Image: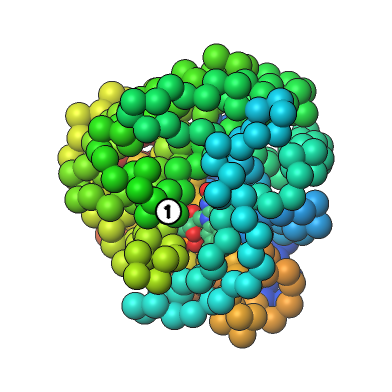
Amino acid sequence: MTNSGSRASLARDFERFQRELPRDFPAHVRDAYRINLSARYLGEPIPHPVGKGSGQLSLNVGQLETDAEAGLAFAVLKTVIAQDATGAQSMAAWAIHETKMKIERRGGGWTVTWKGRGWDRSFADYLALVRAGRDLTRAGQLLTVPSVKYHLPRLDEPFRDDEYAFTTRALAQAWGKSPLLLEKDFSPTLAGDQLADEKEQILRWLRDVPQRIRAHGEVRLAMKLMNARFDDDFQREMMEAAGRADALVVFNRLFDSVQGAAYGGTELSDRNLRVLDRPSARPPVRPSLSGTGNIHSGRMIVEYARRGSSSVQLHTFFQLPLEEYPATDGSRTQRALHALIFDPRDGLIATLLHLEETGVLARRDGELHFLDLLPDAYRPR
Ligand SMILES: Cc1cc2nc3c(=O)[nH]c(=O)nc-3n(C[C@H](O)[C@H](O)[C@H](O)COP(=O)(O)O)c2cc1C
């Protein structure tokens, strides 16, 4: 099909999928457009790049089932605060309860204002959610991955290994199969905390946390890096220090110390993309990257991919007011995916076709490949 033929099909698909997005839309995209959306998260092959970042939208089984039905590629569970065998949590200040979320515009984008932090129910409840996620993963319906905030010491303190041991083992046992895929969250509220005042302290965490976790189980580890309150060079230094992780999630929300709250929007994607643009002498392939921050269009997915991200994780775009989505029916997850993939102006298909027309992306064996957007050093082999 010529690109003008593809454009006409895209306009038609966008319109007919407004009512219902087919669950296996990646197969349709491959068939109809010869575009291969295959992507990777934490080394796992996924049918397309769009997943859900950890947070309030992955707190219960109902949310996961809706995501599985919509054909989301993966979901990261809400962050649980690590504990030892007695239930003690050194990061207990992060396990606070807060329900109110406010979605508002910020600098041309959207942001969610919310003062809550980590998982605020029991650890046993979290393990039940992990088991439900495991079952969906095994059934091939939705890759799910737990997320943990473990103890982070001051420079002159040791790591509390009993929290690392108890939490990692309990999660590995709930998951059953090795390896356990896991995200370690370094959150924006942490960036706003006194604990993160010192660069050396942060770099030590990033260097040491992978082996602290892996000492207690076979774990494939993604580290979700915070936007520290230092300059872009330091943000890059953090990425280098975190080189022992299998993947990095780049980068969690910014912290507004006046409001005492995390925020996103265009400031967040500007900062993230700017940092990812900085040259680095990284070795090929490891850690892989998963982009996060103000992703609300296929065009923005491509921005992160061209800077190395083999998948993306969204939160805010899955919680817009319903009238902001072009779809008229379906769950928020379906409506968001419909816009991200099929929008004829700045959806993923339209953006990939545009890159082909301008000679940036070429077909291989007749297909355009999403993963071909990644620079060489980031491309999975
Ligand atoms: C209300 C809310 C709660 C969040 N909770 C967590 C969390 O517990 N753990 C985590 O790693 N990230 C958390 N995040 C960050 C998101 O997963 C995501 O990385 C971030 O918001 C940037 O993406 P976005 O601009 O699409 O929202 C949260 C975000 C929001 C808005």
- Would you call the spot at circle 1 few (<14 residues within 10 Å), some (14-19), or many (20 or more)? many
Residue extending farthest to the bottom is 323
Residue that badge 1 annotates: 188
Q: Is mark 1 within 8 Å of ligand 1?
A: yes
- Residue 21 located left or right of residue 263: right
Disc 1 element: helix
Q: Is residue 293 above or below residue 166?
A: below
Q: How many marks?
A: 1
> Which residue is rendered at x = 66% and y = 60% of the image?
97
- Residue 282 located left or right of residue 75: left
The answer to whether residue 243 is seen in the rendering is no
* Type of amino acid under label 1: Pro
Q: Is residue 133 above or below residue 203?
A: below
* Residue 310 quadrant: top left
Nearer-the-camera pick, 26 or 61: 61
Q: In which quadrant of the rendered image does the C terminus lie?
A: top left
* Residue 283 quadrant: top left
Nearer-the-camera pick, 120 or 380: 120
- Residue 319 located left or right of residue 280: right
Q: Indicate the position of residue 158 as horizontal and vertical percent values.
A: 43, 22
Nearer-the-camera pick, 342 or 220: 220
Q: Indicate the position of residue 206 as horizontal and vertical percent values.
A: 37, 31
> Which residue is rendered at x = 29% and y = 62% of the image?
270
Q: Indicate the position of residue 172 as horizontal and vertical percent values.
A: 70, 24
